[in-house]
Image (spheres, rainbow, N blue to C red):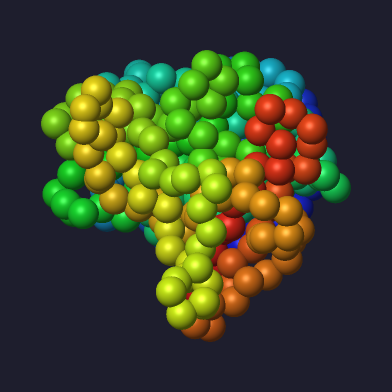
Amino acid sequence: MPKFVGDITNVAGGLLSVFDAVLPLQENWSIHDAAAGTNAKVYKCDGDILFYVYVGDNQTNYGLIRLWATWDNITHTGSGSQTANISFCKSRSAYNIYINGNRFIYINLDSSKNNGHYCGLIKRIDTSKKLVLVVGGAANWAYQEYNFLSGFGDATDTKALLMEDVDGNASVSVYPMINSNSRIHDLDGKIRINETPLCHKTVNPRYFIGWYDGVVCLLNMPTGWPPGTGDRITVNGMDWISYNENISIAYAQNKCLVRVED
């Protein structure tokens, strides 16, 4: 099963321990540079698009994630298209990771808090484009009270960045195309599950570029749908898991669904 669960230690290197235990076992993923710095490593994904994931984990509460188009494991430096640092939370006591050959979804969670993050290729309209995405917090912010996969756009404390956009520009913001009050129902009354579409950050219009791979953003949908964290929703034989951030903040009840792979 490409879903992995376990405990995570909130110390320098704690996130690396989790990634080392999960990522290299999967198709297309490997450790590319084990000496990228103090408590820092670079992982390679050689799937539909080749990209590198730098993880700087020399602090508590969060690790810094950065995407690179190329990485030299002799000089320990990246080049080409890249993103700014995005923070991934590790202050909760446990983790869930959903992984395939092109991306992984990382959830840091405890009994009530769920910090969701995304790293890797999206489902693209134009498969010639290198639309590799990382979603999390602004640097130093991922241990705050947000589920980053629930549908936030680019903001001070939440970030979704492409390594390279459709025009070849680096570190470009992306927005999920959702309405926080929408319900996933068709005219026949049936619930439809589809990955959330994504758009480019441009002044006008915001061009549609593709979809999350295995994520439905639900933000603060009404209480009762989806169910609580860990509940399964099955559509056409495929299981989806619900994650809710149930705390009283400005974005209270921010929710998402993550698809369990075959």
Residue 27 rendering spot, x and y as whole percentages? 43, 61
In the visual, does 33 lie left or right of 148?
A: left
Give the left or right position of residue 112, taking residue 87 as reference: right
Residue 91 seen in the figure: yes
Foreground residue among 187 and 31: 187
Is residue 227 shown above or below 49? below
Q: Relative to 196, say whether 59 is above or below.
A: above
Q: Position of residue 129 (x, y in %)?
A: 18, 44
Instruction: Give the residue furthest to the right.
Output: 111
Residue farthest toward the bottom in the current orientation of the protein: 237
The residue lying at 16 percent from left, 52 percent from top is: 126
Q: Percent position (x, y) of residue 88?
A: 60, 31
Quarter of the image with the N terminus in it: bottom right
Q: Is residue 251 above or below residue 193?
A: above
Query: Which residue is drawn at the image coordinates 35% and 19% (left, top)?
Result: 77
State the image quarter where residue 17 is shown: top right
Between 195 and 190, which is closer to the camera in this rendering? 190
The residue at the point 73 percent across, 53 percent down is 223
Left or right: where does residue 167 sit relative to residue 13?
left
Q: Is residue 23 visible?
A: no
Q: Is residue 165 above or below residue 177?
A: above
Q: Residue at x 58, y 57 (%)?
A: 257
Q: Nearer the viewer, residue 113 or 36?
A: 113
Q: Quadrant of residue 225?
A: bottom right
